[in-house]
Amino acid sequence: MSESSGRSAVRLLQGYVWHPANADLDLESYLPRELDEAYLLWDVVTPPFAFFENGEPTASQTFYQFTVLQVFEQRPSADELGQAARAASEALNPLLEAMPGGVGWQLWEDLREL
């Protein structure tokens, strides 16, 4: 079996989730680690930028690197990857919208193989 036709782990969505540093918030209480066929991963990171667009310092927030990935049995086509990313985004959006006030996020389609 050639490398291009075997199992592939692909990052579908990538970005950040954040909340006020003084908030007692456990993301796992609101977000599953598996969502349909995708896996949700997050790790605390140093804020990737110093200020938000409104000028507020990001140092007052706890930031998480956030990744949605999926494992495919065969390397997917570009169309299949796009469909998987849209499906993950549609499934994730209501969960993010239901998060407590003060939680923010910025996610984008990534589609890179891991």
Image (cartoon, rainbow, N blue to C red):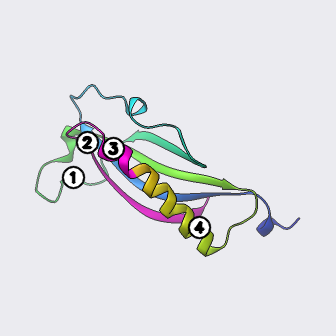
Whether 28 is drawn above or below 12: the answer is above
Q: Secondary structure at mark 4?
A: helix
Q: Position of residue 11 (x, y in %)?
A: 55, 58
Packing grade of label 4 (10 A; few <14, some 14-19, many >=20) is many
Front of the two marks 1 and 4: 4
In the rendered structure, the answer to whether residue 43 lies left or right of residue 58 reads: right
Earlier along the polypeptide chain: callout 2 or callout 3? 3
Q: Spatial distance from mark 1 to mark 2, Cα to Cα?
A: 17 Å
| Residue type of the residue flagged with mark 4 | Leu
Q: Label 2, on which residue?
A: 103
Q: Quadrant of the C terminus?
A: bottom right
Q: Label 3, on which residue?
A: 46
Earlier along the polypeptide chain: callout 1 or callout 4? 1
**Point 43% across, 56% down: residue:** 90
Q: Quadrant of the N terminus?
A: bottom right
Q: Quadrant of residue 82?
A: bottom right
Q: Which residues are magenta?
A: 93-114
Packing grade of label 2 (10 A; few <14, some 14-19, many >=20) is some
Q: Secondary structure at mark 1?
A: loop
Looking at the image, the residue that sits furthest to the top is: 24
Whether 93 is drawn above or below 31: the answer is below
Question: In this view of the protein, which residue sits in the foreground, 22 or 5?
Answer: 5
State the count of labels: 4
**Point 15% across, 47% down: residue:** 57
Q: Label 1, on which residue?
A: 50
Q: Label 4, on which residue?
A: 81
Q: Secondary structure at mark 2?
A: loop
